[in-house]
Image (cartoon, rainbow, N blue to C red):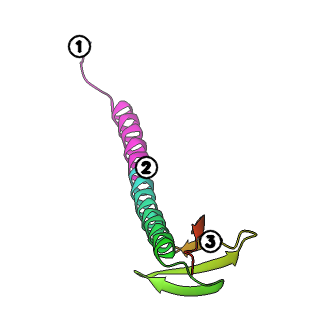
Amino acid sequence: MKNLRGFTLLEVLVALVILAVGVVALERLLTQSIAGVGEDAELTRAMTTARALLAEAEIRPPEPGTVAGSRGGLAYDRYVGSTPDPRLREVRVRVFVAGGQACELTELVRVPAA
């Protein structure tokens, strides 16, 4: 009998199955990575918005109370509370992103003398 070289049909099928499993796994990994990047971008936008709201509070300290609103398509609420020192106010800002996640920052703000 001749010594034949080459692959059998079974070997080719096994190789194709292994290749297909690898391609599917790579596709799922890519999809999850893209979703993670989008989520991180939204959280970064929320953090930037929260920092902007705190910066505004430093420039013009608001009166104590709670305010809710929206900026750049993101909902936020800002709580301003009194502290034992009348020259300071606690400012807490929460910015909400889709999916129920929130970014929260708290800072003490100096109140200018009247």
Q: Amino acid at mark 2?
A: Leu
Q: Are marks 3 and 2 in contact (CB under 8 Å)?
A: no
The answer to whether residue 82 is visible is yes
In this rendering, would 56 be left or right of 90?
A: left
Q: Are marks 2 and 1 in contact (CB under 8 Å)?
A: no
Residue 102 place in picture, x, y as percent: 58, 69
Callout 1: few (<14), some (14-19), or many (20+) C-alpha neighbours within 10 Å?
Answer: few
Q: Residue furthest right?
A: 84
Q: Which residue has dot 3 on it?
A: 92
Q: Amino acid at mark 3?
A: Arg
The answer to whether residue 99 is visible is no
Q: Amino acid at mark 1?
A: Lys
Q: Which residues are magenta?
A: 4-27
Q: Label 1's element?
A: loop
Instruction: Say which of marks 3 and 2 sits in front.
Output: 3
Q: What whole-number distance in Å separates the C-alpha atoms at marks 1 and 3? A: 83 Å
Q: Which residue has dot 2 on it?
A: 29
| Quadrant of image for the C terminus | bottom right
Q: Which residue has dot 1 on it?
A: 2
Callout 3: few (<14), some (14-19), or many (20+) C-alpha neighbours within 10 Å?
Answer: some
Vertical position of residue 18 compared to residue 111: above or below: above
Residue 5 place in picture, x, y as percent: 24, 19
Q: Does 24 lie within the magenta span?
A: yes
Front-most of 96 and 88? 88
Of the two numbered discs 3 and 2 on the same chain, state the one appearing first in sequence: 2
